[in-house]
């Protein structure tokens, strides 16, 4: 039986070549927005260009971060609170992602935030961009 051990440099080397890794060089040039039913989603340009016909696939984006304990609503009832007159079915699973303390992925955080801001600016219909990237705090991501 082999025991798996974490190897930060090897993990980063593998992740940096993944098409969806937001902090990878060239990520912003490799993606584009596609409209769909009143919304938009990211697609990988190369995969989209190669798939002349057939369904468009959504881009899966990857960012390395650390889940914050602050406002962590991950129980079966999510962020439900009886003081709002709503049902549990309307509750959301919610957490905040912060910069990783890991020396391999920590430096990628600022790159990922800048890339996400660029993506968000291209598609946003207004100037209020404060609900995903919490830039009025410490550039955390709200999920």
Image (cartoon, rainbow, N blue to C red):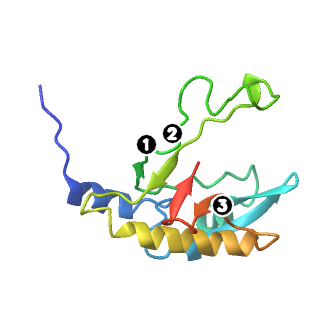
Q: Is the residue marked by circle 3 packed among few (<14), some (14-19), or many (20+) residues within 10 Å?
A: many
> Which residue is denoted by mark 3 in the rendering?
43
Q: Is the residue marked by circle 2 packed among few (<14), some (14-19), or many (20+) residues within 10 Å?
A: some
Residue under the image location 49 percent in, 76 percent down: 26
Kindly indicate the quadrant of the structure image that contains residue 90: top right
* Image height of 80 relative to 11, above or below: above
Which sits earlier in the primary sequence, circle 3 or circle 2? Answer: 3
Instruction: Identify the element where label 3 is drawn.
Output: strand
Residue under the image location 68 percent in, 58 percent down: 51
Kindly identify which numbered label has been placed on residue 72. Answer: 2
Mark 2 and mark 1 in contact (Cβ < 8 Å)? yes
Q: Nearer the viewer, residue 131 or 82?
A: 82
Kindly indicate the quadrant of the structure image that contains residue 105: bottom left
Q: CA separation, marks 1 and 2?
A: 5 Å
Q: Provide residue 85's location: percent of width, then percent of height.
A: 82, 28
> Which residue is denoted by mark 1 in the rendering?
69
């Amino acid at each position: 039986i082999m025991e798996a051990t974490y190897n930060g440099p090897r993990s980063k080397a593998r992740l940096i070549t993944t098409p969806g890794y937001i902090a990878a060089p060239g990520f912003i040039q490799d993606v584009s927005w596609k409209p769909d039913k009143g919304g938009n989603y990211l697609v990988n340009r190369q995969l989209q260009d190669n798939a002349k016909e057939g369904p468009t696939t959504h881009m899966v984006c990857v960012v390395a971060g650390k889940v914050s304990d602050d406002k962590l609503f991950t129980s079966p009832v999510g962020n439900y609170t009886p003081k709002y007159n709503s049902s549990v079915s309307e509750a959301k699973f919610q957490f905040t992602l912060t910069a990783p303390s890991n020396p391999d992925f920590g430096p990628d955080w600022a790159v990922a935030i800048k890339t996400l801001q660029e993506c968000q600016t291209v598609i946003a219909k207004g100037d209020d961009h404060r609900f995903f990237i919490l830039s009025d705090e410490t550039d955390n991501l709200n999920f």
